[in-house]
Amino acid sequence: MLADSAVVTLALPEILQRLHTTVGQVAWVLIAFNLVLAVVARPAAWFYRTRDPAVLCAAGIAVFAGASALCAVAGSLDVLVAARSVQAVGGAFAVIGSLQLLVDELSERRGTAWWIAAGVFGTAVGPVAGGLLTDAFSWRSIFIVQVPIAVLAVPAALAKRRRNGQGLADDAQEHDAQEHDAQEPHTQEPHAQKHRVRIRPNIALALLSAALTAALFLFVLLLVDGWRRSPAVAAVTVSVIPLAALLARPLARMLRSGPMAQTMSGCLLIAGGLTGLALLPSADLAWTIAPQALVGLGLGLTLDPLTLQAMDGRRPHFLHGGWTIAARHAGVVLGLAILTPVFTADLRSAQPPAEDAITALVLNAPLAPQDKIAIARGLADQLKQDRGRVPDLDPAFEQLSVPAAEKPAVAQLERSLNLQLQRAATHAFRNAFLIGAALALVALLSLIPLRRRGTR
């Protein structure tokens, strides 16, 4: 569940095609899930005050499983978005419950660390898993495989039911104390301060999640829908990000840098990586390795310490886990809300000059006039059919019948046209990547401590 949005990302281009929708509309497959989860996370945490976390967690997992099955059989985008919203409700209860169960089973520090690591790992490897499943089967498979996994998790969660209510009473007591402190801020004792919600790390998490949306959502669309790479090739390509994220922690330990230095460096790396993706010189996949590596290193250096900073020493655990989950998913919604209109508008703006370039290439091709006319008609039909997205021109050539002597020229024309579209698509995503980089820099600014009045 912590990896759901990342897993779904690489299936979006096929959903776009199979459900005959637009880029802006298909983005709601992600927006709906993250928006509902962000809204529900805090109220869901409230239910954990007096109830057994194992029961609530198991119920959340069961709802998630049922909604996943509905996603798998959805015949329209509306049904898919509705099912994704139900998924998010179950996911909110399951994710917050899993935090409390881990803390109960291990310890506050170790349980929180494992919970954070699962989220970072899921974010990093989700696109790879989603791409491989989509390429091997279909987009529906990414939801099908979640059902048995979730079903098996239900009895595992119920097995952790508390034998008595002492833990719940302790956490409820902590929560009531915090609510009382919030209402009387000027009469708090020093020990009550540690239970306040930490605002700055949660804001930074939201902004970084928005920035990472460009790397995980837009870059996948560029690979599959813009450059016409298969989901499997895209999955292998984006594997650079999780590999780099895994290397980030050993690198930080080797450099012996503190948490603040790590997170601020990570923000800069993410901004640099997204800027690199905005300035790609061509559609050659080799050019994407270095920018992705920067994003991956930044991911590994930021999400883990920031989440720990937001939650370390915070009780009750479920409450602060709810705030952190809400911040991260609200950030994804923010990123999609900002970036999707930008790149769709840029994509529309790029179409007229791209069509002019295509016309020029066809007119200058060394082909007979009647063959140029046939190709032009096929291309015009394809461009009209794919209006609002990067067109696929290959069908215009598949049924074309030309003399054998002209086949090399036709093949060269097809390659030239595809290169032109790749250049147009790369340019259309540029502003969105740059905005993502700016969001990472704003996250960096939110981490800088403000000087208190009266100090020098």
Image (tube, grey):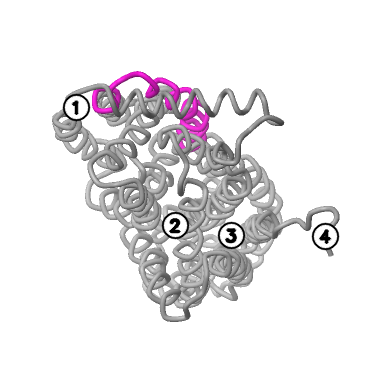
Residue where numbered disc 2 is placed: 304
Figure check: 424 above or below 25: below
Q: Is residue 52 visible?
A: yes
For the residue pair 15 and 384, the one nearer the viewer reads as 15
Residue 455 image label: 4
Precedes in sequence: disc 2 or disc 4: 2
Percent coordinates x, y for residue 189 in the rendering: 60, 36
Image position of 158 (left or right of 230): left
Secondary structure at numbered mark 4: loop
Left or right: where 341 falls relative to 142: right
To which residue does mark 1 refer?
A: 161
Q: Nearer the viewer, mark 3 or mark 4?
A: 4
The amino acid on which the numbered mark 1 sits, given as a three-letter code, is Arg
Question: Which SS class for mark 3?
Answer: helix
Q: Residue at x 28, y 25 (%)?
A: 166
According to the image, label 3 marks what residue? 425
> Which mark is nearer the camera, 4 or 1?
4
> Bounds of the magenta span?
28-56
Q: Earlier in the sequence, mark 4 or mark 1?
A: 1
Q: What type of secondary structure mainly makes up the magenta span?
A: helix
User: 35 or 107, which lies in front?
Assistant: 107
